[in-house]
Image (cartoon, rainbow, N blue to C red):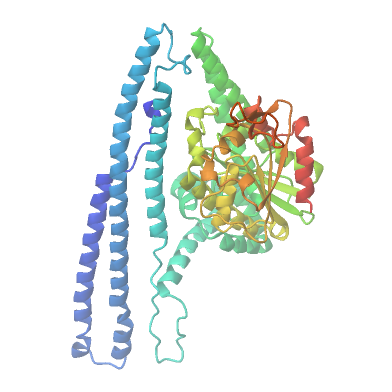
Amino acid sequence: MSPSDVPAVAIDPVALSSVAASLHRYADSVSDSSERLTTRWSTLHLHYQAPEVGELLSRMSVVPRAVDDFAATMKRVATIMAQLADHLALAREQEKSLRDEIDTFRDAVRRFRASSDVPEWGNTGDTWGPGQFIRNQTLLSECLAVRTLRDTAIEEARGDLASIGRPDLLLPPTESVDTPTPSISAWAAEYDAVADDVGFAILEKLSAGTADDARALLALHDDWRRLFLENAPDAAAVSTWWTQRLTTNPRALDALVFGASLVIGSLGGVPPASRVAANAVNAKMRLPVIDAEIRRLDEAGRGGEMAAAAAERKATLERLRKQRDYLQRAADGDVQLYLYEPDSHSIIEMIGTLDDTTTDVITYVPGTFTSVHSFYGDEVQQVGRWLQTNDSRVTTFVWKEGPFPGEDADGGQANLGRILEANDEPAARASGRLIADFQRELLCASPQAASAQQDAMGHSWGLAAVTSSEVAGARYSQVHSLAGAGMPSGWTPNADTRYFHWGYTDALSIAQGTGVVWDGHIPTRDSSFSSHLYSREGDFPLYLPSGIGSDATVFSAQPPPSIPLTTRPLENHNLIASQDAENQSALEDIYREVRK
């Protein structure tokens, strides 16, 4: 337990509260300006006599209504921000208190270990004084509570802001037969048109010349790339635009794929094959950076170093070489990257080919501790590759967008101290929305994917993300839990979806037996899931005391209650998501259901 485990409240509550107060003042000033403007316009007929005055005044009547709506919206935003500031202020107070408590606790543990003649802090994580282990777990729980308070407040604020609709304001009809009556909100139409037009104007500019021209333009305008990352055009509109250019000017699309690959590799609505080609370029561009870092680390070890530093340097070199090998395979076309944004901890690998023979598209979400390094080491793609090897009609997208619970973005190792993040519902819901967006964009961009059966698989925490995506609107024919953790509180099974749970007795299933994992909302306790649990060497039951007195009968027709345990808890948890020989029977059973 260390102060770094305490979730930080990065947003300054005081600054946020100040901004909220400013917004409220601006809203009042806008309303005052609207009143003055209306008063001035209402006297137009006194100074200007013409037939069009009546129509002009009629059209200007929309202004005060629009301003009032705008001012009300600003006040609503200000209220939401003020409420968020209050919650974050409380979270920041708890954060500071926790850091102080942890510092005090660590000093106490150090003193105990020093008095016990234990030489080093880092090598004695299992040595505790009286009550210290429980205190450590309590502090971890309090850290999770702060994280939940912070994330829930932010999530609720986002939801409240997203619920603020655009003004439903219609321009008044005119008497002229030549002017059509608007049938949609003028503001909404303009908002959508501007948002999309900016993006498409940039795409037109980038596709006007060669790939080198596009590359040079992006080098000059990094703000263009950021615009697409933060506010890209709608995926359906991009798909329509792309299809039209494919017919009229395919060379323009080549310029985009190979010259503006940093944009195209992440742009929803672009066909998967084109995104893969763009990310092959992105992978190739990253190789020289990795090579330079490998050379630097190689040279750093030539002058001699301490054993601990040498071990860390060698571990870093191993990770870099795995990354280089993986990206080289992507550059060569042996690995297909539908998305590759390592700076945002995002990567989606497409396994298989989308064509007219594709029958099944699987969204596969790996579990706790997954990082981009998990992909570099080919750890989380095993089920997808097994399925594609056995049936080329099955295409799997191994999905990771944003940080995962317990993820170590730098080293790729499991941080067991952050295991409680896998029980964090707001984080799973946020990932679920991203998965639902991914499915929508994929179906817009690929007719082959849209005509195939949509399935989902979630290993461990991945099931919580998959079922959260259903809450966010994603739809699947089948959902497969591979040792899945649980489902969010708002989840209900879809009547048109078949649900399966596959696994072994493992660390997670043992923890689930306590009822603390996802508040007991787990697949083995939900009747909508068809459960398939496989036995393995090392499994054994722990029989619970029956409470029968010494004078009671010795024999009973009923066996005593028991808890399933295993001598291989972690190994079994990962086995269900592997291609190992011992997991072949389970994989064949899963494939049999997918093909039904």
Quarter assignment of residue 190: bottom left
Q: x, y percentage for residue 172?
A: 38, 84
Residue at horizontal 70%, vertical 52%? 361
In this rendering, would 158 be left or right of 243? left
Q: Locate residue 345 relative to residue 152 in the image: left or right.
A: right
Q: Nearer the viewer, residue 557 or 70?
A: 557
Residue 373 horizontal/vertical position (percent)? 58, 31
Pick out the residue farthest to the front.
551
Q: Nearer the viewer, residue 48 or 465?
A: 465
Question: 42 above or below 93?
Answer: below
Q: Nearer the viewer, residue 509 or 47?
A: 509
- Above or below, 45 against 236 in this view is below
Task: For residue 213, say whether it is visible.
Answer: no
Among the 4 quarters of the image, the one containing residue 341: top right
Q: Which one is nearer the viewer's eye here, 368 or 135?
A: 135
Query: Which x, y percent locates residue 34?
Result: 23, 73
Measuring from the top left, give residue 433's x and y in whole percent: 52, 53
Residue found 76% across the figure and 39% down from its top? 586
Which quarter shows the N terminus? top left
Q: On the rendered image, what quadrant is the C terminus found in?
A: bottom right
In this picture, is 586 found above or below 186?
above
Please indicate whether residue 501 sits to the left or right of residue 50 in the image.
right
Residue 179: in sight, yes or no?
A: yes
